[in-house]
Image (tube, rainbow, N blue to C red):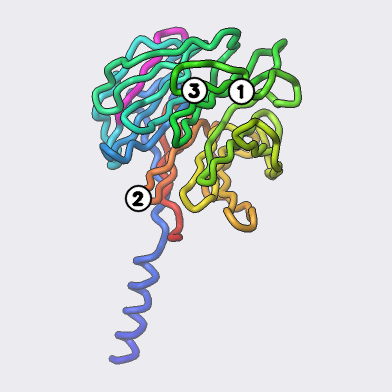
Amino acid sequence: MRGLLIITTLLGAVAATAQTPPRTLSDIGLVGSECARYDAATDRYVVSNINGAAPGFVSVVTPDGQVEKLHWIDGLIDPFGIFVAGERLYAADGDTVRIYDRRTGAPASSVVVPGAQRLNDLAVSKDGTIYVTDSGKADQPGAIYRISRNGKVVQWAPRNDAMERPNGIAVTSDGMIVHGGRGVNLVFRNAAGKIVRERSLPAGRIDGIVAMDDGGLLVASQDGHVVYHVGANNGAITVVAKDIEVPAAIGYDSKRHRLIVPQIRAASLTLVDLPPR
């Protein structure tokens, strides 16, 4: 009986630490779900929807998978990237960065980016500086713009082919700006825009990048149909989500240690509870 008790206890411990299978939320009203972010202050997910030729919109989804408000923010053009920081929600929409109240969704301000071809993803640093990628077009290379707190816009990383049509961007815990695009390289720059280092991934067409508090990164690769974790210390690359048709601008639920993967074509969200840290 004692041996049976020990075995039962061990089996219970294994079950308690087993990873929960991914859960996909589909047919919930999303249309071209491009970007998902976790709002820790309100404990909810905000999701941008490109919505084809119709106006884009932003939805609110609860962590248990319920649509709290499908059209929370409406009337957008192409809201590819969104970001939550301070009391604001930022949206990269066409050639404009639009700023809203993070709690109510009420418009706060907007900044037009002169010369922008297609603003894609954005991240906000601790001092309120906005970094936004411009993926360009077939005949136009990409660039990265910086917007100061007072609304001044500069082309921070000049438009050229070496930018590889930048898409995902994030600000790391130590203040580095990391971005990726059509290739396989993650590019790390300091605040002045100088390239400090690069890190190659097994597969490219990099979309969303999430900077974690411990210095690690979560990176979506559309060519690999996966999401990678890039370790903070040794840069070790592991796959944390796989077999995803088009992983887009991913989010991270810090309360639940959960990856949030929007899928554009499938118009869905896949929730992946990550292994214990």
Numbered tag placed on residue 148 in the rendering = 3
**Camera-side mark, 2 or 1:** 1
Numbered tag placed on residue 74 in the rendering = none
Observer-nearest of 69 and 116: 116
- Main SS category, magenta section: strand
Q: What residue type is labelled 3?
A: Ser
Asked if labels 3 and 2 touch by Cβ distance under 8 angstroms, the answer is no
Q: Is mark 2 on a helix, strand or loop?
A: loop
**Quadrant in which residue 76 is drawn:** top left
Up-down relation of residue 125 to residue 144 (above or below): below
- Per the image, the residue denoted by label 1 is 144
| Residue 213 image point, x, y percent | 46, 49
Q: Which residue is drawn at 35% across and 21% down?
A: 58
Q: In which quarter of the image is the N terminus?
A: bottom left
| Residue 114 image point, x, y percent | 56, 8
| Residue sitting farthest toward the front | 150
Q: Is residue 6 left or right of residue 93?
A: left
Real-space Cα distance between discs 2 and 1? Answer: 32 Å
Tell me the magenta residue range.
53-60
| Residue sitting farthest toward the bottom | 2
Q: In this view, does 186 lie to the left or right of 262?
A: right
Up-down relation of residue 89 to residue 227 (above or below): above
Real-space Cα distance between discs 1 and 3? Answer: 13 Å
Q: Quadrant of the C terminus?
A: bottom left
Q: Does the magenta stretch include residue 197?
A: no
Observer-nearest of 31 and 101: 101
Q: Residue at x 66, y 19 (%)?
A: 142
Q: Which residue is drawn at 49% across and 26% down?
A: 130
Q: What residue type is labelled 2?
A: Arg
- Per the image, the residue denoted by label 2 is 256
